[in-house]
């Protein structure tokens, strides 16, 4: 019997978090709109999804997040001014970042009940089809987009795909860790998922890095899901339940993952992306070397 693998068309981005680790910067500005070089963090994630063929973006928002919706919309006055002044490069950059008309949806989480609850809030927009889940705090840096690689693996093996990266085995207790099974082209079968295992008990050093392709059956599980760690509804708990009936595979991402929800990750992302840009690297490389030598 041939397995039918349905195309991944939609992506869910949970952007309702308060960003308390970045106060006072996030008192009036959503953490997702903090910039890495010259783009908001959330734009990097959307561009990664667009490169993977995502057609519709579902933003799960909260109060004071309207600026995210504005960012992914046309600003008529700004574009007219750029056009009048002959700023064609800047104008094109704005045009290229926009999803197509009607390709974005925004829904409110209303209460901070955890990542699993945020995903469940997107159920009616996603419908009965597989979808990508991208945590907007996690910014990937590589020639090949993380989600594009996941889609390639998904189209070969189906089921559910979780992106993973290797960490120092001594730090495995800080992450959600997966067990490694049968090798696949670009990844491996997942044998288990453990959230922050006790030191010395982790089944591997592959940690979940914030990208998922999930089947829609997870919505029914989340609807009945009891609160877990932090008294919140956890998507990991729902994935463990779903794994009882459906296969989970890991895509082994070989690039760099920056947790821009932490100050150190945000700073490192700025440095990495600046050094990766031919127009900026010559302006900052020597200054960075001097700062490091002085430190």
Image (spheres, rainbow, N blue to C red):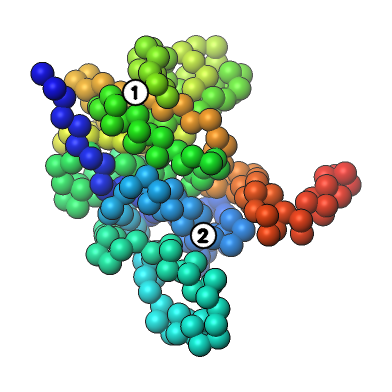
**Splitting the image into 4 quarters, where does residue 61 fall?**
bottom left
Side of 64 relative to 283 (left or right) = left
Going by the picture, which residue comes out furthest to the right? 294
Can you say whether 172 is above or below 273 in the image? above
Marks 1/2: CA–CA distance:
30 Å
- Residue assigned mark 1: 249
- Residue assigned mark 2: 40
Q: Is residue 103 visible from the viewing direction of this image? A: yes
- Residue that appears at 51% across and 59% down: 40
Front residue (pair 253, 156) = 156
- Residue that appears at 33% across and 47% down: 53
**Residue 176, position as x, y percentages in the image:** 45, 27
Q: Is residue 230 visible from the viewing direction of this image? A: no
- Residue that appears at 22% across and 34% down: 215
Q: How many marks?
A: 2
Can you say whether 71 is above or below 152 in the image? below
Front residue (pair 261, 288) = 288
Q: Quadrant of the N terminus?
A: top left
- Residue that appears at 59% across and 62% down: 38
Can you say whether 199 is above or below 73 in the image? above
**Residue 183, position as x, y percentages in the image:** 40, 14
């Amino acid at each position: 019997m041939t397995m039918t693998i349905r195309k991944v068309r939609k992506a869910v981005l949970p952007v309702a978090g308060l960003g308390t680790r970045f106060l006072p910067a996030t008192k009036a500005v959503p953490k997702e709109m903090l910039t890495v070089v010259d783009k908001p963090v959330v734009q990097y994630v959307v561009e990664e999804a667009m490169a993977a063929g995502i057609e519709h973006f579902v933003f799960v928002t909260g109060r004071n997040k309207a600026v995210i919706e504005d960012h992914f919309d046309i600003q008529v006055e700004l574009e007219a001014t750029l056009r009048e002044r002959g700023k064609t490069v800047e104008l094109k950059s704005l045009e290229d970042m926009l999803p197509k008309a009607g390709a974005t949806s925004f829904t409110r989480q209303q209460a901070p009940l955890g990542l699993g609850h945020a995903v469940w809030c997107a159920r009616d927009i996603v419908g009965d089809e597989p979808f990508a889940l991208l945590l907007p705090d996690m910014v990937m840096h590589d020639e090949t987009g993380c989600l594009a690689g996941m889609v390639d693996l998904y189209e070969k093996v189906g089921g559910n795909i979780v992106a993973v990266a290797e960490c120092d085995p001594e730090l495995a207790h800080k992450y959600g860790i997966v067990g490694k099974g049968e090798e696949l082209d670009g990844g491996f079968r997942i044998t288990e998922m453990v959230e922050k295992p006790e030191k010395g008990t982790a089944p591997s050093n592959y940690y979940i890095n914030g990208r998922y392709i999930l089947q829609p059956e997870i919505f029914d599980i989340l609807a009945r899901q009891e609160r877990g760690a932090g008294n919140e509804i956890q998507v990991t708990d729902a994935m463990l339940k779903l794994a009882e009936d459906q296969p989970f595979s890991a895509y082994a991402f070989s690039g760099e993952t920056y947790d821009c929800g932490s100050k150190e990750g945000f700073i490192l992302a700025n440095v990495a992306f600046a050094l990766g840009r031919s127009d900026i690297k010559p302006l900052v490389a020597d200054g960075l070397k001097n700062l490091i030598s002085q430190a």
